[in-house]
Every structure is written in C-alpha cells, then in structure tokens.
Amino acid sequence: MSGDPRIEAYAKLLVDECIDVQPGWQVIVSGGMLGRPLIEEVCRQVALKGAYAVQRVSFSGTGLNLPWAQNAPEELLDEPSAIEVHPFHEADGWVGIEAPENTRELSALPPERLGRIQAALRPHIERAFTYDLKWVGCQYPTAALAQDAGMSVTEFEDFLFGACLLDWAAEKDRMSRYAERFDAAEQVRIVATETDLTLSLSGRNGMVDAGGANMPGGEFFYSPVEDSASGTIAFTEFPAVYGGREVAGIRLRFEDGLVVDASADRNEDFLIETIDRDEGARRLGELGIGCNPRITNHMKNTLFDEKIDGTVHLALGNGLPDVGGTNVSQIHWDIVKDLRGDGTRIELDGEVVQEGGRWLI
C-alpha cells in the first residue's frame, strides 16, 4: 500500500484531529511491523508538527513481547521493566497501530500470565485512561484482519479507509443529538430476545467518539453506575473475542451491578476464568452505542464491531474515569449486542428511543 494517498490522509487524521499534536511533544508511535507504511507516515506528520516521534515496533503486532511473556519467571510478570514503562509516564501523545500477522496470537499465552502482565502495566498507563496522555488506537489493513472479516485484503483496505475517513464534524453533530437524550436520562433499558437489562446513568454524562481516542470513531459511551445493572442479556448474534480467544453465545445475569450467572455456548471456561480475574471484572465499565454508518457487518474485530450502526456494547471490567466510571479491573472486554432485529429496543426512562436499530428521536 506504500504510496496510497489514503495513508497520508489517515495519518493526518490521527495526528491532527485525534490527538492534536503540539510542537515539542513527545509522541509514542507503536505498532506491528506490517503497519510500516502507516507508522512511517505518522512519524512524518509528527515531525511536521515540530514534535518528537518515539517509534516502538513489535514483530507480532500484539504490543507484547510474546517469547518473553511466555517464558519469564512469574515474579517478573508482576513488575514491568522500568525502561519499558518510562515512556508512558513522560509522553504527551500515543498513536497505537494494530497490524497483526495473526489475530489469535495471544491465545498462545495462558490467560493467567496475560492477566498478571496487564495488572502490572495498569498503574503505568493510568494517564491514558484519564486522557492526561492523549492517545488514539487504530488499525492498519493486514491479511489477518481481512481474513477475519471475510474479505480480500483490497476489500478490507477500502472498508477500513471508508469507515475512518468520514466527515467527523458532521458525525459528531449527529451523535450528539442522541447522546443528549441519554445524558438527561436516569435509566436505560435494553430489550431483545433473552434480554431485558436495566442500568442507571444517573449523574453520568457520556462522550461522543468522533475522531478521538478510537479510529474508526462512531459511538457514544458511558460508564454506568457501578451497582445498577439488573436483569439479563444474551450476546447470541456475534462471538466475542478477547485475548486472542473467541467465546460464542455469552449470556449474563446481573444483580445490583454484579454478574451473578454467566454461561457461553463455546469457551465457557475462558469466560468464567476472565470474569473471575479480579473484583471488578464482574461489573460493567462501559455502555456504548454504535453509530458508524459505514460499519454494518460483524468481523470479529472489536475496534470496528463496537461501532456497528444499530448495536450496543457492554464492557465488563474497568470503568472510564473521563465519564465518571469508578470500577477498577485489569480487564475491559467489549461485547457487542445486535439490536437491529424484530422486537429489539432501547428505552430511556420508559420512552422507546430506538427500535430495531432505528432511532425514533
């Protein structure tokens, strides 16, 4: 793809709009080696802003040193190298570019080891959760991502750029109208087959993602009141992917904000192991509403799937401090629920605002 003008437009979007790089900033530019054209173009755009680009390239595209993570003594997993984490304390910006050779690469790492690494890193990337460290996560089109999406590489390239290179000012205006109704609501109810879940947004305002910390954008999101989720939800339309593993047919029952019953049609043991990882993993950290008009199909790619127009996603685990979330966990697992079918709806304080994936407001 070297020489494709869309790469320059994509890089300018990441640098100019998503994190708004300023002169003198130190910007981490990390990614898999297959993303070299975008990594290099982002570094060029950072340079044109009069800022420093600190390049960090991984072989696997996962962001983890897998041979080390698989073989290091367990006590080292709990205390990351000071050199490794130092940039996250000092940097002003971070552009993270996923460019995997194999989207299931992390499945080679036992979940318990992955969890310990994530828990150890958490204090050092807290600035990203509060946006003191301006960041954006994105993807570069690789054969692995295209294969998961059921597309050729060329088709996936066109899809990715189509979903990212939108008029984000117009998209922000559109989504803000919906978000204002959620901001004014006390209770959200999600209804579908095997699903009747209520949660509270009382005292919480949302954030519209339109060219911000995720690219593609195309959602608005909240951290629900931590003890409010009650009822059931069935994620039976799409499989959920986390840590390189795929779990199908997830069903959850909540009481007082806590998952008290969980099952899955496939990989249930992994589901239970993940939500038992720490005290916060059985609570909700996020409710997101997908709105990207260019994303209509599920691709086993959470960065895109959570933005499907007519869906919602719930994240188990870590809350989002910038929207009032207080739940703390080493996991943040976004699981997508399709609301485009018959009999599905979203209610705000008893008023139906979306039905069959179509807005009524």
Image (cartoon, helix red, strand yellow):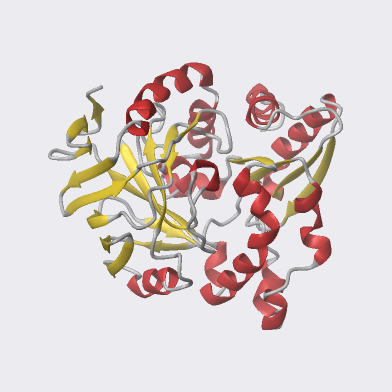
Residue occupying the far front of the picture: 203
Position above or below: 176 against 185: above
Side of 345 where 202 appears, left or right: right
Side of 57 where 123 appears, left or right: left
What residue is drawn where x is 38% and y is 48%?
Answer: 224
Residue 152 or 76: which is nearer the viewer?
76
What residue is drawn where x is 56% and y is 57%?
Answer: 102
Residue 101 or 284: which is nearer the viewer?
284
Residue occupying the far left of the picture: 343
- Give residue 318's position: percent from left, percent from top: 49, 57
Position above or below: 103 against 138: below
- Mark yes or no: residue 353 visible: yes
- Give residue 320's position: percent from left, percent from top: 51, 48
- Give residue 239's position: percent from left, percent from top: 34, 55
- Give residue 195's position: percent from left, percent from top: 19, 52
Position above or below: 3 against 249: above
Q: Quadrant of residue 305?
A: top left
Q: Quadrant of residue 256?
A: bottom left
Side of 49 where 254 appears, left or right: left
Position above or below: 70 against 83: below
What residue is drawn where x is 70% and y is 36%?
Answer: 38
Q: Pick the quarter of the image with the N terminus.
A: top right
Q: Pick the quarter of the image with the C terminus.
A: top left
Residue 303 or 275: which is nearer the viewer?
275
Side of 233 where 313 appears, left or right: right
